[in-house]
Amino acid sequence: MGKDFPTREENYSQWYNDLVVKADLAENSAVRGCMVIKPYGYAIWEKMQSILDKMFKDTGHSNAYFPLFIPKSFFTKEASHVEGFAKECAVVTHYRLKNAEDGSGIIVDPEAKLEEELIIRPTSETIIWNTYRGWIQSYRDLPILVNQWANVVRWEMRTRLFLRTAEFLWQEGHTAHGTDKEAVEETLRMLDVYADFAEKTLAIPVIKGVKTANERFAGALDTYCIEAMMQDGKALQAGTSHFLGQNFAKAFDVKFTNREGRQDYVWATSWGVSTRLMGALVMAHSDDDGLVLPPKLAPIQVVIVPIYKTDEQLAAISAVADKIQAELKAKGVSVKYDDRDTQKPGWKFSEYEFKGVPVRIAIGPRDLENGTVEVARRDTKEKSVMHITDLSIKVEHLLEQIQSNLYNKALNFRDTHTYKADTYDEFKQRLDEGGFVMAHWDGTTETELKIKEETKATIRCIPMNQKAEEGKCVFSGKPSTRRVIFARAY
RNA sequence: CGGGGUGUAGCGUAGCCCGGUAUCGCGCCACGUUCGGGACGUGGAGGUCGUAGGUUCAAAUCCUGCCACCCCGACCA
């Protein structure tokens, strides 16, 4: 493991893929485009889930669950929504198999055709808004703040582990409100939750912004997003929050009586992040020696490796290791003491390094004599000898340092790969180098599409919290009032 | 779905042009020596050569169909 592993320089895309497979995060399954998430990878996803879930609940949301199947007629009620997803839907048409009469095996029973086809959800707005119709009569029933953790299916042409798979896991929040103001506030609140999660937990800096009309979610009035930069300079959309206006309420006839006694359509939002965040995590921090995990998401935060020749030595080392382990666990640190005698220390060092364990503690006979341990951190590869007095406090601080170091490193990378471009030549050159290019844009979809066609770059977002600036569109030369972010994206 | 390529042990491969006992490395198993950065030696196990058919005394190798996967385009969290 770890041998014959390409560097990022050699082949970034293969580096990513090999890393995901060799670090035991996930592998391709027998089903085209669908992955198996392995225990180590799933443990990271579970940590993401539990942290996000708490953030959702702290902002007033509750979890619920809606069906995997959506009747075709529901799906087609919101015109732009269908148009956006139609090309990638898996459809259930039959409900029974039978033995072929010629004995050739099991076939779909043609007698068992469904009256109405069922779409396997690519997202749940339609089934949920059809349900909400029955839940909402009065302003007293609002808001509805619901989230669901689920799997969805989008029949993608080309897939990549975590970044784009035909089936993926995600959460989708679907909220209903009495006013547009309240719905917009909710949309922005959840965008902040995502940004906060990305920066504090994933240690990935993100840019909050709004999508252009062309990049907007099918059925939304506005799509807000957080955009992150990967180590090859490409952009990755890490989360989206949509203001859906009254589109779905109108499509599913969800009305309520407001305080003034008048009927009105309900205002909606939806927001989601997916297992794609796993891909972002890998691509943002890892290096040519394997995975690098931020401590807040590492399934194992500290690994203890004994170095010994005899059983007596192992026993003495284990006594020290057990004490250290107990102290760390008392502080909520997840520790693994790897005293397997089937692998050698050097092998274990490489193994845990490859799997991104933030801190490694090695204890050998020398340490026993001196009352020390060797502490190695994964992010910088630095090793130091520490006295075991107050070791758990030192390690706790070290984990915090690693978490913030990863964030700062990623932030520095993004800043040094973000450029302003004022001419089209400069613009194209910067894109080829990789990174975000801040440029003026005339605001038309036409220009956006032409730039995409010529450069493969898209407008990642129109950043929020950015001051207005007069300028000329980098493509058309027409006047513009602010810069937007262009990049090639995943 | 267009254009190109590849299927040989768990993984990576040689052999194919020019038909005749299937190669090597990693991994795996056993034993011994090792153990502070992926140890070494000796022995061993593991194969319907993607699949179905054809040509032939004989097919991994030649021919045809099918299937799967990879790369390049259009689509995307």
Image (spheres, coloured by chain):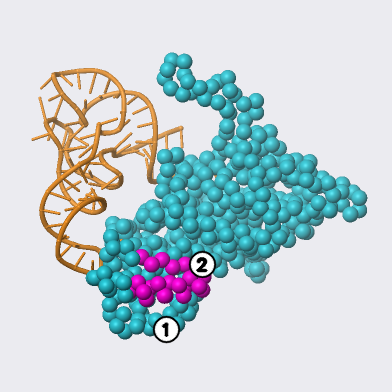
Chain colours: A cyan, B orange
Does residue A476 lie above or below A414 as drawn? above
Is the residue marked by circle 1 packed among few (<14), some (14-19), or many (20+) residues within 10 Å? few
| Residue lying at the far top of the rendered structure | A102
Q: Earlier in the sequence, mark 2 or mark 1?
A: 2
Residue A431 visible in the picture: no
- Main SS of the magenta part reads helix
Q: Is residue A361 left or right of residue A281?
A: left
Residue labelled with disc 1: A389
Q: Is residue A91 left or right of residue A131?
A: left
Residue A247 visible in the picture: yes
Nearer the viewer's eye, disc 2 or disc 1? Answer: 1
Marked residue chain, label 1: A
| Figure quadrant of residue A52 | bottom right
Residue type marked 1: Thr
Camera-nearest residue between A285 and B24: B24
Q: Is residue A329 magenta?
A: yes
| Figure quadrant of residue A225 | bottom right
Residue at left offset 52%, top offset 53%: A275
Residue labelled with disc 2: A296
Secondary structure under tag 2 reads loop
- x, y (%) of residue A134? 78, 42
The image quadrant where one finds the N terminus of chain A is bottom left
Residue at left offset 68%, top offset 33%: A73
Camera-nearest residue between A56 and A196: A56
